[in-house]
Image (cartoon, rainbow, N blue to C red):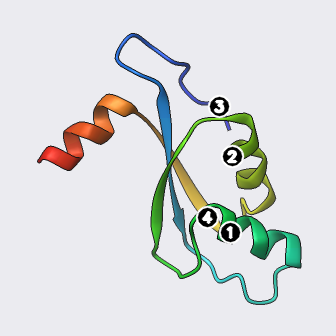
Amino acid sequence: MSAPSSNQHGTSQIVVTQVRSGIGAKPKARGALRALGLGKIGRSHTLPDRPEIRGMLRKVSHLITAEFVTAQEVSDAETA
């Protein structure tokens, strides 16, 4: 899971979307979903690109999709 590094426009962010159910997943994986702000299929959340977030993403990689964007792209999408 390689991501763009921080650049002059801002820090990178990760848009995480849950694509599979947490039912039947191990308790630590369900906890990681909750910590990421997810819980239902189709729900998305924008998170900062930090090591602790990446660890949670790795724990639930089979349940989510992750897209790396810069903070500038996030603010542009909110104003559109």
Q: Which residue is mark 4?
A: 64
Q: Amino acid at mark 1?
A: Leu
Q: CA distance from mark 4 to mark 2?
A: 13 Å
Circle nearer the N terminus (2, 1)? 1
**Alpha carbons under labels 3 and 2: distance apart:** 14 Å
Tell me if 2 is positioned left or right of 66 in this view. Answer: right
Density class for disc 2 (Cα within 10 Å; few <14, some 14-19, many ≥20) is some
**Neighbours of disc 4 within 10 Å: few (<14), some (14-19), many (20+):** many
How many marks the image carries: the answer is: 4
Viewport quadrant of the N terminus: top right
The answer to whether the residues at label 1 and label 4 have Cβ atoms under 8 Å apart is yes
Q: Pointer 2: what residue? A: 53
Q: Quadrant of residue 18?
A: bottom right
Amino acid type of the residue that numbered disc 3 sits on in the rendered structure: Ser
Residue displayed at 59% across by 36% down? 49
Q: Nearer the viewer, mark 1 or mark 3?
A: 1
User: Compared with residue 64, is residue 1 higher up or lower down, i.e. above or below?
Assistant: above
Residue where numbered disc 1 is placed: 33
Alpha-carbon neighbours of circle 1 within 10 Å: few (<14), some, or many (≥20)?
many
Under mark 4, the amino acid is: Ile
Tell me the crowding category of disc 3: few under 14, some 14 to 19, or many 20 or more residues within 10 angstroms, Cα based.
few
Q: Earlier in the sequence, mark 4 or mark 3?
A: 3
Residue at 66% from the left image edge and 35% from the top image edge: 50
Q: Which residue is mark 3?
A: 2
